[in-house]
Image (tube, rainbow, N blue to C red):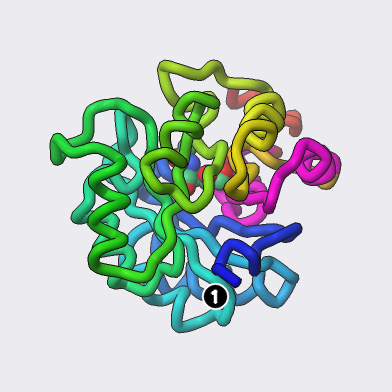
């Protein structure tokens, strides 16, 4: 049984501070580890986390698989952009390393396949390929990815943002791949979780809608008269 089997049919919760707000008060490994412990207590089958400090703190706080990544910047390839980042995340204790698997240029001039090879040679970590198109998913599996996630749908030049989660991409990936396909990106509701499993998801990842008070409040405030006056 590999680690992805432990995720089958479950909810994975991403415990990360907000990407686009460096002053998010939740940007603290102790805080993220407490959030992770809470979501696991609530039934999350795994936790996704950003950065070696958060991965290490969360590994110590929970007994479910940890999907680690390292975000660098906000443009181009920013999810675990280099082999060195991937090795650091694995060394911090991630069972699975999430890596951008698009074919865009990377800061180390290497390819996604090189990162997979480096992880295989030096760690036991499995590789989750974050993609935005079917073609990227197919190429990622050819390059050795253990699973594919729709994380980058709507966040790359090759994909268009959808209002909610990209269920079409999910269904197409699930239709052509034999590895687990993870639904991730803009999941906000019980209905969307159901729709993802109906479309063939192996597991569903929810992030901001569960773990970011900053994101949730910013989402709700415009519905108030006081918030509407601000916009
Ligand atoms: C595109 C990107 O940078 N995605 C990141 C991946 O780790 C996170 O910022 C997201 O919160 C995560 O994917 C979960 O998605 P959502 O918060 O929409 O449920």
At which x and y percent is residue 60? 45, 83
Looking at the image, which residue is at 30% across and 69% down? 123
In the displayed structure image, the side of residue 97 where residue 4 appears, left or right? right
Give the residue at x 68% y 53%: 203
Magenta stretch? 191-219
Residue occupied by mark 1: 34
Residue 222 visible in the displayed image: no
Instruction: Name above or below for residue 142 compared with residue 124.
Output: above
Q: Is residue 116 visible?
A: yes
Above/below status of 2 relative to 81:
below
> Secondary structure of the magenta portion, mostly?
helix
Q: Is residue 81 left or right of residue 131?
A: left
Viewer-closest of 110 and 94: 110
Instruction: Decide: few, some or many residues near mark 1? Use Cα within 10 Å; few <14, some 14-19, many ≥20.
Output: some
Say which of 227 and 5 sits in front.
5
* Residue 157 image offset from top left, x and y in percent: 41, 17
Please tell me whether residue 79 is drawn above or below residue 225 in the rendered image: below
Residue 27 picture location, percent across and down? 40, 59
Q: Quadrant of the C terminus?
A: top right
Residue 199 included in the magenta stretch of the image:
yes
């Amino acid at each position: 049984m590999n680690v992805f089997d432990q995720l089958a049919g479950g909810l994975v919760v991403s415990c990360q501070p907000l990407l686009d707000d460096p002053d998010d008060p939740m940007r603290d490994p102790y805080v993220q580890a407490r959030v992770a412990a809470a979501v696991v207590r609530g039934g999350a089958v795994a936790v996704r986390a950003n950065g070696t400090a958060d991965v290490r703190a969360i590994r110590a706080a929970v007994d479910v698989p940890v999907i680690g990544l390292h975000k660098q910047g906000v443009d181009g390839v920013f999810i675990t952009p280099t082999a060195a980042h991937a090795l650091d995340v694995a060394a911090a204790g991630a069972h699975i390393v999430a890596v951008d698997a698009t074919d865009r240029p990377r800061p180390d001039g290497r390819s996604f396949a090189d990162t997979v090879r480096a992880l295989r040679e030096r760690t036991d970590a499995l590789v989750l390929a974050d993609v935005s198109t079917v073609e990227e998913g197919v190429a990622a599996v050819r390059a050795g990815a253990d699973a594919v996630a729709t994380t980058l749908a709507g966040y790359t030049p090759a994909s268009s943002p959808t209002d909610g989660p990209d269920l079409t991409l999910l269904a197409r990936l699930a239709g052509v791949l034999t590895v687990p396909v993870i639904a991730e990106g803009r999941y906000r509701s019980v209905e969307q979780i159901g729709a993802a499993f109906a479309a063939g998801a192996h597991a569903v990842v929810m992030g901001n809608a569960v773990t970011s008070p900053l994101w949730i409040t910013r989402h709700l405030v415009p519905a108030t008269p006081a918030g509407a006056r601000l916009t």
